[in-house]
Each structure stands twice: as C-alpha cells, then as structure tokens.
C-alpha cells in the first residue's frame, strides 16, 4: 500500500479512505471530438469531492456502452456543452456508465453504504427532492432523471467516480472486477423492459422475441426471459452468432439477413410496395413459429433497433401483446401501422434504464447466478478509445466489454486493503 501522496499511478492504491487531490482519468475534450479511438486521452485532473448524499468510489473496472461512442463523436449531443450551458465548469467529459469498485469516501447524509464496501454502480441519477418524485413519480420518469457518465460527468473512466448513494449496489462476490463492471446498464435496462410494465411482464411459457441477441441488451434479455420461465427467441445478423445465443439460453435464433423488408413502412396506398413488405413480414412471422416450434406469436417484443424493425415488431406481436423499446440504433423515424395497435389492442411502450428497485432485482439475479455478465473483451484504461471504436464499427465480440482501471490484471475478485 502506498503512502499518502498527491496522485497515484494506475496500479497503486492509496490508504483506504484517503482521497488524493488529483487522479488519472481518460478524458474527452471538445477539440478531440471525432472517431472514438482519437477522442479519449488519459490526463491528470482534480479528484471530485462528494457532497451531501454523494459517494466517491475507487474504480476497479468500468463497463463500455454505446452512450460514450456518442460522447466521443460529439453528436447527437455535445454533452460537455450541454452541461456548461447549465452552469458546469468542467471543459471535459469523463465517461463510463458502469463500474465496480470500493466506496472510498461519502458525503453528509449517506447511510446506505460505508467506506470499504465493494459495490457495482448503476447509471440512473435524479434529484431525490424533485417535486414529481415527491408526488410519487417513478424516478426514471422524473424531469430530473439523467444518465451518469454521459449526461452527468465523473463517470467510471477515472480512478475515482462520483455518484449518488442510491446508485451503489453490492458487488456479487463470485465475480471478477471486470465482470462485475459489465452488466448493470444493459441488464437493468433489459429488466425494466421485460418486468417493469405490468401486466405485460414475462410469465411462464411466454414467447419473447429479442432483437440483437448477441449485444449487451440482448444477452441480458435472453437470460432474464429464460430465468422467468419464458421462451426467448433471438434475432441476429449471421449464423456464426447462433451459438452465443444458445449459450445464453435462447430456445431459437433467427438470422435477419434471410429477409430484406427492413426499414420504413411503405405507404399503404402503394399496393405493390406494401404487398412486398407484408410478404416479408409474414415470412418473418413464419420463421418465428418455426424456431419456436409452435404457432404462437410473441407476448413481448424486446425492441431497440427502432426504424428498421418497428413495423415488423408491431405486426408480429400477439394480440394484447407489447412492443417495448429503449433505443433506436437503426434510426429514430419509425412507422406504425395503427390498425394493428387499435384493432388487436397491442401496446407500444417506451422504456429507459431502471429505478432502484429494478436495479436491485437485476443485481440479485446476478448474485444468484441466474444472469451472467456475458463478458467478452477486457481492455486497459489506455485503450478506452479502442473499445469504443470497435463498438462504433460494430466489430466487437458478442456480449459486453470492460476496462481495467485500478485493477491490475484480469481475474481479481477483491482487493487487499
């Protein structure tokens, strides 16, 4: 253990509870906006100080998510400029919306965790004193809700991360630091989609269609559906991704490249184009029956591609079923044939991350071994940009990626202090 000093090299650990004035972090600055592999750079910055209700965490490992591809590009939102317009002084962004680590310091009025606790962090932040929350609103629907490590600064790509107390959850003891850092954002997002919108939740025997089965969201969704007794059917872009989905627990897998009707819905007045689209959608539905092994429609369609797939998702969902969406990775302009919504009484539901109870429920599933983080690749802090570049180009391996921050090597489950 090192003595008290102004800054600690990566791999050095200060005395428990001692907060050095400065820290190393991988920063994005406006002048570096562009390709992710050029946008991140390790610099020395002042260590943040926890205020009331806040927790400072010594970051052992950090997760990789697409939101910091956007942060690196500077689009669709310049997150640095957006914060500065609201009064923030920092002219940099420390990203990272997933982490595992150790509570190092707490501000006033923190009783949920203590210094030395091993934790994983969620990315949902809000003002606990907001009027809408005080009136009973789900915090994730509050006007104050933000995503830490993207909309808010001081994320996990630094030696210390600054969070609110309710973002801390017990680290599963059996997991390595890097695995524990990989699952919360995608896992809790998937949990809310599948379990957060009653009565449309996964029950025993429910078929569920899951887009992007090898991605972070999809890998979590498959496992959650399986653990709930549902029947997960995954969609992927190539046959070499089938085995991963089966390992996660999928009953069947569909290759979307076998179909070509993706994209915006044709005008219903264009009989030829609409007929061609309908033929493709029906063929996709028949393929779902084939891999499921019976002629049943999905009770829930787990959506995130958006523009390219929403028309098919709405068509294929069961009567009184739900299409639940948390993103628009293929585009935001999605067409809806309203006839299927009202005549067959289907539900199109938006969903964004998760509240404290949902994060805790997902975390317990990981602790109990029902959900695996599906860790695929691990990088050192110096290669944060390379990891995001792979994600930007869709060249990353199936599953989730992690960054070693203060952890010195893969495979560590704790830190001797």
Image (cartoon, rainbow, N blue to C red):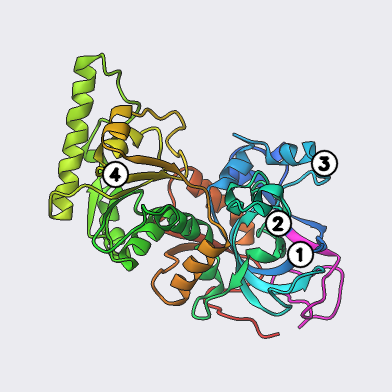
Tell me the distance, in whole angstroms, between the alpha carbons under discs 3 and 2. Answer: 20 Å
According to the picture, the residue beneath numbered tag 3 turns out to be: 87
Residue 337: tell me if it is visible: no
Q: In the figure, is residue 414 to the left or right of 276?
A: right
Label 1: state its secondary structure. loop
Q: Which mark is residue 397?
A: none
The quadrant of the rendering that contains the C terminus is bottom right
Q: Position of residue 192 (x, y in %)?
A: 46, 55
Q: Which mark is residue 128?
A: 2
Tell me the distance, in whole angstroms, between the alpha carbons under discs 2 and 4. Answer: 35 Å
Going from the N terminus, do you reach mark 3 or mark 4 first?
Answer: 3
Mark 4: few, some, or many residues within 10 Å (few <14, many ≥20)? some
According to the picture, the residue beneath numbered tag 4 turns out to be: 320
Mark 2: few, some, or many residues within 10 Å (few <14, many ≥20)? some
Q: Nearer the viewer, mark 3 or mark 4?
A: 4
Q: What residue is at 74 percent from the left and 78 percent from the top? A: 115
Q: Which residues are magenta?
A: 1-24
Q: Are marks 2 and 1 in contact (CB under 8 Å)?
A: yes
According to the picture, the residue beneath numbered tag 1 turns out to be: 53
Q: Main secondary structure of the magenta part?
A: loop
Q: Are marks 3 and 4 in contact (CB under 8 Å)?
A: no
Q: Position of residue 124 (x, y in %)?
A: 61, 55
């Amino acid at each position: 253990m090192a003595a008290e000093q102004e800054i600690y090299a990566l791999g050095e650990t200060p005395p428990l509870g001692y907060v050095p004035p400065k820290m190393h972090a991988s920063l994005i600055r406006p002048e570096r906006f562009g390709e992710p592999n050029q946008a991140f750079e390790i610099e020395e910055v002042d260590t943040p100080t926890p205020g009331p209700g806040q927790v400072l965490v010594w970051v052992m490992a950090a997760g990789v998510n697409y939101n910091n591809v956007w942060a690196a590009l500077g689009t669709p939102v310049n997150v640095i400029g957006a914060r500065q317009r609201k009064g923030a002084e920092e002219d940099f962004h420390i990203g990272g919306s997933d982490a595992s680590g150790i509570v190092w310091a707490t501000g006033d009025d923190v009783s949920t965790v203590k210094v030395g606790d091993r934790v994983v962090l969620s990315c949902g932040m809000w003002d606990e004193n907001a009027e809408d929350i005080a009136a009973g609103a789900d915090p994730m629907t509050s006007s104050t809700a933000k995503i830490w490590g993207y909309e808010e600064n001081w994320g996990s790509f630094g030696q210390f991360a600054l969070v609110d107390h309710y973002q801390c959850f017990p680290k599963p003891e059996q997991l390595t630091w890097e695995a524990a850092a990989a699952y919360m954002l995608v896992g809790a997002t998937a949990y809310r989609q599948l379990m957060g919108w009653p009565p449309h939740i996964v029950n025993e025997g429910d078929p569920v269609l899951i887009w992007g089965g090898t991605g972070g969201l999809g890998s979590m969704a498959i496992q959650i559906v399986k653990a709930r007794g549902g029947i997960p059917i995954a969609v992927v872009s190539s046959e070499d991704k089938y085995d991963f989905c089966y390992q996660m627990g999928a009953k069947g897998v569909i290759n979307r490249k076998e179909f070509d009707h993706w994209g915006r819905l044709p005008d219903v007045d264009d009989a030829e184009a609409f007929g061609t689209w309908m033929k493709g959608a029906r063929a996709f539905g028949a393929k779902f029956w084939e891999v499921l092994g019976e002629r049943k429609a999905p009770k829930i369609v787990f959506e995130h591609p958006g523009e390219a797939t929403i028309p098919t998702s709405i068509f294929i969902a069961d009567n009184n079923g739900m299409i639940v969406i948390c993103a628009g990775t293929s585009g935001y302009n999605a067409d809806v044939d309203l006839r299927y919504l009202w005549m067959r009484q289907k539900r199109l539901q938006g969903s964004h991350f998760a509240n404290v109870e949902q994060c805790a429920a997902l975390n317990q599933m990981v602790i109990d071994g029902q959900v695996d983080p599906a860790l695929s690749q691990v990088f050192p802090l110096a290669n944060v940009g390379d990891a995001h570049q792979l994600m930007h180009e869709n060249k990353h391996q199936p599953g989730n990626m992690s960054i070693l921050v203060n952890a010195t090597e893969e495979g560590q489950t704790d830190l001797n202090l």
